[in-house]
């Protein structure tokens, strides 16, 4: 993940403008760039209105500062190498470097055996060996395209679009470097499951914001037909693999957050690729998942059993809210779905809200610091989806957390509309 804590803090405090990246210096932004973009998970009308306010001088000071943070994130992304899935030193079980490969995050060498096999599980503790495989390059690519796409849309700086389009070409289109649209060898466990597990599909949630970011690049002079069509075809193929493969099927029916995110990914990528048939099929199953995962009091038992129970409660809720957002586009009202005994997304949001607000201590395990940026954005989405500003009121408390990063200011000030009384 791209992080600029010191620089971002300085920019937020001073509102410094980073030279030629500043929005006022680029005429293309106010000329040829399309009035809006095609939204997948994000609201393009809101983002375009914020962009226009920044151009005409009516933006808030917080929005101006957040723009400079976004520019800093994009400038940092520009400095990253253009990575490919084929860069890894050796291929995975298939023998093909185009296949995505990753080590399961919570599994470690066995201290009781000479060769460390079989690996043993330490829930919530990440094994740094993961960095030797494809998860970090995937994260870097997805983060870079996100910040570059957003920054291009807000500033019109073609350098951002050029860099982003090249990354998309290398990862998804170029026959020499493209990733095969499947996750057949993700989260393998040495000595346990050496050829990958369906649970590895959770890792492509890093592509969650890719469709909107890519669509923001549509007006760039650097966007080409082969990249546009190639990327859309890749996601079409990936959504189909998620629907048809043994791994995709197993992950979509998994009972905890893995299953929710597999469904959210499938529906998101299907909508991006124009596969309404797949999105419709996925969304029709979600009321049953809500009923199975959420208790009448709003707790999520599968997530509460984890060592980072608050994080995973939030993580699963965010997947459900992505599905509810997609449901709005397909006439499926998941925001207001409720079983006779009270199982619903609103109940899940109400369950975590007082803990986010520090109104009472969390009674379950949470061995790592809370990620304020994720929880704050979740509460803003909840405030919009439920039309209830009580969730919005929690955000200032979450912004005090040490883990509330620079990207949170960009999301809250530029990307997600604030809920109003």
Image: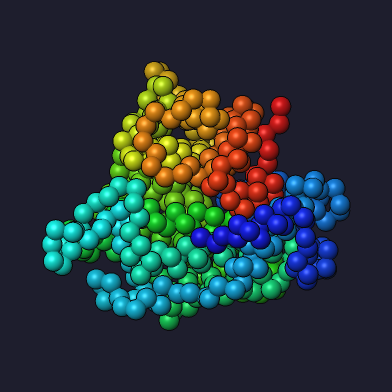
Left or right: 201 as drawn, with respect to 34: left
User: Residue farthest to the right?
Assistant: 57
Number of labels in the image equals 0
State the residue in front, 49 or 159: 159
- The x, y position of residue 18, in whole percent, is 75, 66
| Quarter occupied by residue 228 | bottom right
Q: How is the image coloured?
A: rainbow
Q: Which residue, as the protein is rendered here, is positioned at the far top?
A: 341
In the rendered image of this protein, does residue 107 appear above or below residue 175? above
Q: Position of residue 391 (x, y in %)?
A: 59, 30
Q: Is residue 368 visible?
A: yes
Q: Please state if 374 lies on the left or on the right of 203 as rendered.
A: right
Residue 362, compared with residue 121, is above or below; it is: above
**Which residue is at 26% across, 61% downward?**
188
Quarter location, residue 109: bottom left
Camera-side residue of 9 and 258: 9
Residue 123 sits above or below residue 285 on the image: below
Across and down, in percent, residue 176 comes to 43, 81
Residue at 16% from the left image edge and 62% from the top image edge = 117
User: Hey, which residue is sitting farthest bottom in the picture?
Assistant: 176
Apparent side of residue 162 relative to residue 52 in the rendered image (left or right): left
Look at the image and tell me in which quarter the C terminus lies: top right
Q: Residue at x 35, y 70 (%)?
A: 132
Residue 231: image location, x then y, percent: 51, 67
Compared to residue 398, the image places residue 139 above or below, namely below
What residue do we see at 27% from left, 50% from top?
Answer: 122
Viewer-proximal residue, 128 or 298?
128
Q: Is residue 44 visible?
A: no
């Amino acid at each position: 993940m791209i992080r600029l804590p010191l620089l971002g803090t300085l920019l937020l405090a001073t509102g410094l403008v980073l030279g030629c990246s500043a929005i006022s210096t680029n005429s293309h932004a106010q000329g040829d760039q399309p009035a809006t973009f095609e939204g997948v998970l994000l609201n393009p009308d809101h983002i375009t209105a914020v962009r226009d306010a920044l151009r005409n001088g009516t933006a808030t000071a917080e929005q101006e500062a957040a723009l400079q943070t976004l520019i800093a994130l994009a400038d940092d992304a520009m400095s990253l190498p253009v990575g490919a899935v084929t860069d890894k030193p050796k291929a995975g079980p298939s023998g093909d470097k185009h296949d995505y490969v990753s080590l399961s995050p919570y599994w470690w060498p066995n201290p009781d055996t000479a060769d460390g096999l079989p690996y043993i599980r330490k829930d919530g503790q990440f094994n740094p060996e993961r960095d030797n495989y494809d998860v970090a390059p995937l994260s870097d690519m997805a983060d870079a395209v996100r910040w570059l796409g957003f920054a291009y849309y807000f500033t019109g700086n073609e350098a951002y679009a050029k860099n982003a389009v090249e990354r998309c070409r290398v990862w998804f289109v170029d026959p020499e470097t493209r990733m095969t649209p499947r996750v057949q060898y993700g989260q393998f466990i040495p000595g346990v499951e050496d050829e990958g597990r369906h649970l590895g599909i959770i890792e492509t949630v890093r592509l969650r914001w890719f469709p909107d970011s890519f669509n923001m690049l549509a007006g760039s002079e650097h966007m080409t037909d082969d990249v546009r069509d190639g990327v859309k075809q890749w996601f079409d193929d990936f959504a189909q693999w998620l629907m048809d493969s043994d791994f995709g099927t197993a992950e979509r029916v998994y009972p905890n957050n893995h299953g929710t995110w597999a469904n959210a990914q499938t529906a998101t990528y299907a909508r991006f690729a124009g596969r309404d048939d797949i999105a419709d099929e996925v969304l029709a199953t979600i009321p049953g998942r809500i009923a199975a995962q959420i208790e009448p009091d709003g707790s999520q038992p599968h997530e509460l059993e984890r060592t980072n129970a608050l994080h995973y409660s939030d993580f699963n809720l965010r997947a459900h809210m992505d599905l509810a957002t997609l449901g709005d586009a397909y006439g499926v009202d998941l925001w207001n779905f409720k079983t006779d005994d009270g199982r619903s997304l609103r109940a899940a949001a109400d369950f975590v809200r007082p803990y986010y607000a520090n109104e009472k201590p969390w009674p379950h395990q949470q061995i790592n610091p809370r990620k304020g940026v994720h929880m704050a954005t979740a509460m803003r989405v909840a405030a919009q989806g439920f039309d209830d500003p009580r969730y919005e009121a929690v955000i200032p408390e979450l912004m005090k957390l040490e883990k509330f990063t620079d990207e949170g200011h960009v999301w809250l000030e530029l990307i997600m509309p604030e809920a109003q009384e």
